[in-house]
Amino acid sequence: MFEHETVLLNEAVDGLNIRPDGTYVDCTLGGAGHSRLITERLGPEGILVGFDQDPSALEHAEKRLAGAACRVRLVRTNFRRLAEVVRELDLGPLDGVLFDLGVSSPQLDQAERGFSYHQEAPLDMRMDPRQEWSAFHVVNEWTEEELARILHEYGEEKFSRRIAAEIIRERRKRPIRTTLELVDIIKRAIPAPARRTGPHPARRTFQAIRIAVNDELNSFRDALHQAVELLRPKGRICVITFHSLEDRICKQFFQSQAETCVCPREFPVCVCGKKPVLEVVTRKPVLPSEEEIERNPRARSAKLRIAAKL
């Protein structure tokens, strides 16, 4: 059963400023919580398109969205194909695009998916099971330099070099095949005082490997650019992030698209002619309420940013 508690549900859907006859894309269908609320606000002329790479998520969403008054199209694909799919479906300009970048609870909780550092499972971490390469390939085939880089950049892990070196030492003996084997290696690499404080010692490394396996940050950058191109004037883009890397990408992208002149300050007049494309609706991110965090602790790190097409 694909059970997932949607984060910032009303805040995100309110941020889309739903028009009953509008066309909206949920780029991260997941448990279909946001999508269901969107369909409840759409009329018969409205259209919702939902993207997900996980077949179990799509199967669950199809059941949950059955009987919606609007038209619903569900697509199994990565959201970096946003523009391509919109053209294929002949949708025209969009009224809103939503990204919820959190990993769905079922993906974390199903041991066989290999996302969890609490349960024994094969090293996998693929969002799309059709993808050939997995966490096993990253851990066992990437160089020490490549591993250290992603742990530092994607996981913001200060012991990235020690962990990468320990992975290399261990895999010289035999391949690293399971999640808990990797957890033991990470624990050995991190000094004991650092292991005793803060989050689980494997959290940052698992995050980094998951991002690398699914090319998440590059996919997100690509999709952001496409979404803005596809929006009609006054159309909205809402983004929920769960860690600083994604939030930084979103914040900087919104700011760059909202900029006017980018000429050097010493220029007496503007010669670039740059016009703003977006208006940033949320100067500061919208955060979950204390009540939501108490009900769903996984919501604690969520941030919602909203922008509108000019």
Image (cartoon, rainbow, N blue to C red):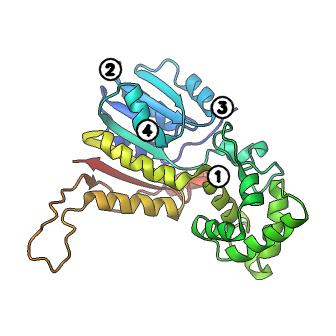
Query: Which of the marked residues, 1 or 2, is nearer the chain's N terminus?
Result: 2
Q: Mark 1 points at which residue?
A: 213
Report the amino acid beneath label 2: Glu
Residue 285 visible within the image: no
Determine the image quadrant of residue 147: bottom right
Report the amino acid beneath label 1: Val
Report the amino acid beneath label 3: Ser
Q: Name the residue under label 2.
A: 45
The residue sitting at 61% across, 33% down in the picture is 57
Q: In the rendering, at what x and y percent does residue 39 appear?
A: 42, 28
User: Which one is nearer the viewer's eye here, 82 or 172?
Assistant: 172
Q: In the image, 40: left or right of 181? A: left
The answer to whether mark 4 and mark 3 are in CB contact below 8 A is no
User: How many other residues sit within 10 Å of disc 2, few (<14), some (14-19) or many (≥20)?
Assistant: few
Query: Which of the marked residues, 4 or 2, is nearer the chain's N terminus?
Result: 2
Query: Which of the marked residues, 1 or 4, is nearer the chain's N terminus?
Result: 4
In the rendered structure, find residue 82 and report the number of the disc placed on it.
4
